[in-house]
């Protein structure tokens, strides 16, 4: 494995010319928007975009869930995602029986955890939003998932998330690095969140990161970490207690499972990771591999654990999995602000109220 890594490291510089070419194409596209030759649509209700500059793994989903918890009791909130790797096309407003196959794993997760939310998917948000509003005209706020590069829509509040372990200011454009566009694109953000931080991150380190980001006058920077909650039963949703120590088979099809592995190990559990690609849909062969691996764990106190995003896809196999009669748990994750939580909350709510007031005045309400 180390030999393969060494070879890939040696070959990586060969990708740099392709990054320059890709970066030029993206820069030209952004320039067309910046000078007004291409234009984005602004809608007459609060639209909040949550996105990133890199490909995957920054923690957008728990941040959208944080916003849903913040807003759900005061506003009628809708989400719109692309529905990555779904087996459908076009606009879909999720119903109570919608699955990950139809709407994608992350929207399916939103639907399961926030059943009162209007969860929708559409590849083109510019046409998807009017369709959503025609079906849910009482919508107060729309949360756009992974729409930072989707410039055909102009959100009123643009939230950019960057991973603490790989911040955008240290990264490079694809395929040499993981950035979808150049570092300077951060200037479009209103709020920048440094995610997946250690909870004990010193204030001096936070100030150093802010200095590297060099936020503009209108931009605010926040720091968040991921807090794992108590597991619940995959089949019933009932809260469960993990008896220590457990031999855990952790099934993950997410971009970066390492934080969850570390959390379980620090909780005293022995962890065997069975990792799959991000957003992976589990085949019959995968299910058989999971069962065989679980049975081969040399311990009686065995438990199968997965993430909420994986659970949305594994739910497609729920009937098959239920025949195993084994303990199968899901570990939830939530965003925790290292500081200034109230300032973030107030910024979001104040934006929504200001947008609503301006729209009411414009339309004479």
Image (cartoon, rainbow, N blue to C red):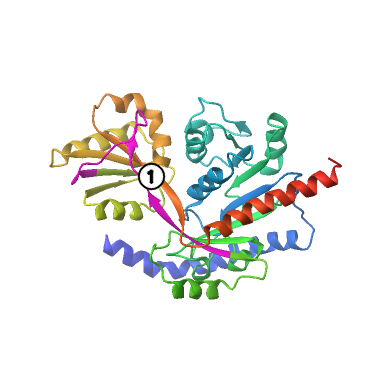
Measuring from the top left, give residue 10's x and y in whole percent.
38, 70
Residue 94 visible (yes or no): yes
Residue 138, quarter of picture? top right
Please tell me how many numbered marks the rendered image carries. 1
Measuring from the top left, give residue 213's x and y in whole percent.
56, 71
Q: Is residue 243 magenta?
A: yes
> Which span of residues is magenta-colored?
221-248
Q: Is residue 84 magenta?
A: no
Measuring from the top left, give residue 26's x and y in whole percent.
64, 60
Which residue is found at the position 53% from the left and 70% from the top? 169
Q: Which residue is mark 1?
A: 253
Measuring from the top left, give residue 197's x and y in whole percent.
42, 62
With respect to residue 10, does 65 lie above or below? above
- Towards the viewer: 85 or 146: 146
With respect to residue 260, does 222 lie above or below? below
Which residue is found at the position 64% from the left and 51% from the top? 349
Q: Quadrant of the C terminus?
A: top right
- Towards the viewer: 260 or 353: 353
């Amino acid at each position: 494995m180390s030999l393969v890594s060494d070879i890939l490291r040696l070959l990586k510089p060969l990708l740099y010319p392709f990054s320059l070419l890709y970066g030029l194409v993206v820069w030209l596209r952004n320039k067309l928007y910046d000078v007004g030759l291409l234009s984005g649509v602004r809608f007459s209700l609060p639209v909040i975009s949550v996105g990133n500059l890199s490909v995957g793994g920054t923690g957008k989903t728990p941040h959208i869930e944080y916003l849903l918890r913040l807003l759900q009791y005061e506003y009628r909130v809708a989400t719109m995602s692309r529905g990555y790797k779904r087996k459908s096309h076009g606009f879909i407003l999720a119903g109570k029986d919608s699955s990950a196959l139809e709407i994608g794993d992350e929207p399916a997760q939103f639907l399961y955890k926030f059943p009162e939310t209007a969860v929708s998917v559409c590849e083109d948000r510019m046409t998807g939003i009017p369709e959503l509003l025609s079906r849910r005209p009482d919508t107060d706020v729309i949360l756009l998932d992974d729409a930072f590069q989707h410039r055909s829509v102009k959100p009123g509040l643009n939230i950019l998330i960057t991973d603490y372990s790989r911040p955008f200011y240290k990264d490079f454009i694809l395929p040499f690095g993981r950035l979808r566009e150049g570092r300077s694109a951060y200037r479009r953000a209103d709020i920048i969140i440094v995610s997946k931080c250690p909870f004990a991150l010193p204030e001096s380190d936070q100030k150093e990161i802010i200095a590297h980001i060099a936020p503009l006058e209108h931009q605010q920077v926040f720091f968040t970490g991921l807090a794992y909650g108590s597991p619940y039963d995959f089949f019933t949703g009932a809260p469960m207690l993990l008896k220590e120590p457990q031999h855990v088979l952790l099934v993950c099809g997410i971009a970066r499972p390492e934080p969850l592995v570390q959390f379980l190990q620090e909780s005293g559990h022995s962890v065997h990771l069975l990792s799959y690609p991000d957003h992976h849909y589990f085949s019959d062969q995968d299910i058989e591999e999971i069962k065989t691996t679980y049975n081969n764990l040399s311990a009686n106190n065995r438990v199968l654990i997965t993430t909420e995003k994986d659970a949305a896809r594994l739910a497609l196999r729920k009937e098959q999995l239920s025949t195993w009669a084994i303990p199968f748990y899901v570990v939830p994750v939530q965003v925790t602000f290292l500081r200034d939580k109230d300032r973030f909350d107030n910024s979001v709510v104040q934006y929504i109220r200001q947008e609503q007031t301006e729209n009411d005045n414009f339309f004479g309400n």
